[in-house]
Every structure is written in structure tokens, then in C-alpha cells.
Amino acid sequence: MKSRYRICNWSEYNAALEARGSLTVWIDEGVLSAWKNKQKTGKRGASNTYSDLAIE
């Protein structure tokens, strides 16, 4: 028979469940400045073109 795991500290358990879905992303400043689209098409509703660095 399988042994059962019983949770004793519900506040820690709930905090761990919330933290399980978090994601930290570090982006270099050089990459961030090259990421932004600086070219304007002049047309309304035109899609942006992003650098290859942003897509990687």
C-alpha cells in the first residue's frame, strides 16, 4: 500500500504552489535596445518587424 503524504503547513504549501508558476527572465541592456523596432512604416495597422536578436 502507498503511504499518504499529509500536509502540515498549508500556508507554506500554498506559497510553494504559487511560486511554482513564476519565471524570472534576465535580458541584457544591449539586447533590449536592439530588440525594439525603430523603423516606422508610416501605415496604420502595419505589423512591426523585429530584429533577429529578439526572435532568438
Image: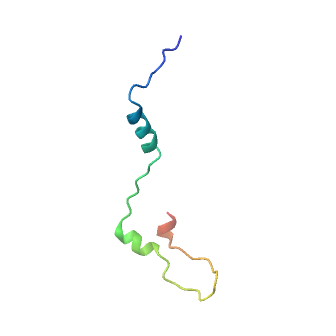
Residue at image point 41% right, 40% down: 15
Q: Residue at x 43, y 74 (%)?
A: 34
Q: Is residue 23 above or below residue 3?
A: below
Residue 32, by quadrant, is bottom left
| Whether residue 32 is situated above or below residue 46 in the rendered picture | above
Q: Quadrant of residue 9?
A: top left
Q: Taking 42 as reference, is 16 above or below it?
A: above
User: What residue is drawn where x is 39% and y is 35%?
Assistant: 11
- Locate residue 17, reporting x and y percent: 46, 39
Q: Position of residue 49 (x, y in %)?
A: 56, 76
Vertical arrangement, residue 46 with respect to residue 19, above or below: below
**Residue 16 percent across, percent down from the top left:** 41, 38
Give the residue furthest to the left. Answer: 29
Which residue is drawn at the image coordinates 38% and 63% (left, top)?
27
Q: Nearer the viewer, residue 50 or 46?
A: 46
What colour-coding does the image apply? rainbow
